[in-house]
Image (cartoon, coloured by chain):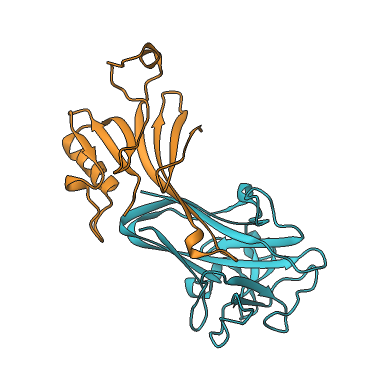
Amino acid sequence: MATFTWTLQGSTDTTIDSGDTLQFAGPDGFDSKITVGEYNDGTYVKSSSDTDDSSGNTPNNVKFISQSGGTSGASQADWGDGTEDLGDITDAEATLKINFSDASSVATSGALYYAYDGTTTTAAPSGVDFRAAEVGDTNFTEAEGSGDALSMADQAAATSHDFYIAVSSGPTSIGAKSFKTRIELTYA
Amino acid sequence: MNKVLWVATLSNGEVLYEEKGDYTTVSGALSPWNKLQEHLTESNSKITALGLYTEDGRRFNLPSTETNPKFNEFSKASIPVSYRMFRKVGADITGGTVGAQEKYTVVEATYEDGRRLQIWVDEKGITSWAIIV
């Protein structure tokens, strides 16, 4: 059976379970606000009962710094060691690990990851800047709506496939923001 | 176990069904579709018709390359040059649920001009769509 398992990576990974929310938060930790025009200083898993499921797991955080200000036009981000070129991030330092598994050995292709408004997959989230990159990418994709999705690399036949994704988000207007992110892929 | 399965007719006359005979799912082994690709190479054959079926008798067929159609419209229809099957899965992550993922089994016929006809069948084998891409 084809199954996705998505985790927020950290010193201990936090599985994002049914009903959980991936939270991008400000400099004051879980549930804190991000200033308009700024990006996340923390990433957390919020349970359906509004508690921090990632507490104690030292969750990874990738903060967008610039789209093309790095070496040879690379994007820049801060994942805990100051500003670095995005291309230097490792699998373990990425925000998300999305695992796709199947009983038999299948190849994956055309994998996409993007944020949308929660209703219409082609619609960008409102009042939010959302950036994503697969580990190995040199630049972020402004992955807002399926038409602007992050394209991820095809993977050869195996029973388990991991996708490592750095994500960063921030508000472009005042007020709480809620949106969904989505992965789609083809396998055979 | 998938509930919507492929059935392929080959140029050597074989009719092969996913989850039957050599094309059953074996944990950790190549998927039935990938086994079929190996068999096509080894037998120097190709797919001449491809469709989807369910155990309770539903069938979703692409146009075939066969030359003995029962109706005139089929004899005049364009003939595909190749076929493939894949499964498409999508899932919401933030605020989503594990059970909310959607899965479709898709068969695709490619024509000489590059256009592709796809039949998408949902995981329950009840609803289908045909699209040209």
User: Which residue is more in the foreground, A5 or A119?
Assistant: A119
Q: Quadrant of residue A43?
A: bottom right
Q: Is residue B46 above or below residue A12?
A: above
User: Which residue is more in the foreground, B112 or B73?
Assistant: B73
Asked if one can make out residue A115 in the rendered structure from this viewpoint, the answer is yes
Asked if one can make out residue A139 in the rendered structure from this viewpoint, the answer is no
Q: Residue at x 35, y 14 (%)?
A: B71
Position in image of residue A41 (x %, y %) = 68, 77
Q: Residue at x 27, y 16 (%)?
A: B68
The chain painted orange is: B
Residue extending farthest to the right is: A174
Residue extending farthest to the front is: B56
User: Which residue is more in the foreground, B15 or B28?
Assistant: B15
Is residue A40 shown left or right of residue A101? right
User: Which residue is more in the foreground, A71 or B36?
Assistant: B36
The chain painted cyan is: A
Position in image of residue A74 (x %, y %) = 63, 62
Is residue A33 shown left or right of residue A88? right
Q: Residue at x 39, y 31 (%)?
A: B109
Position in image of residue A134 (x %, y %) = 53, 62
Position in image of residue B7 (x %, y %) = 28, 37
Q: Quadrant of the N terminus of chain B?
A: bottom left
Q: Quadrant of residue B43?
A: top left
Is residue A37 shown left or right of residue B87? right
Q: Is residue B50 above or below residue A184?
A: above
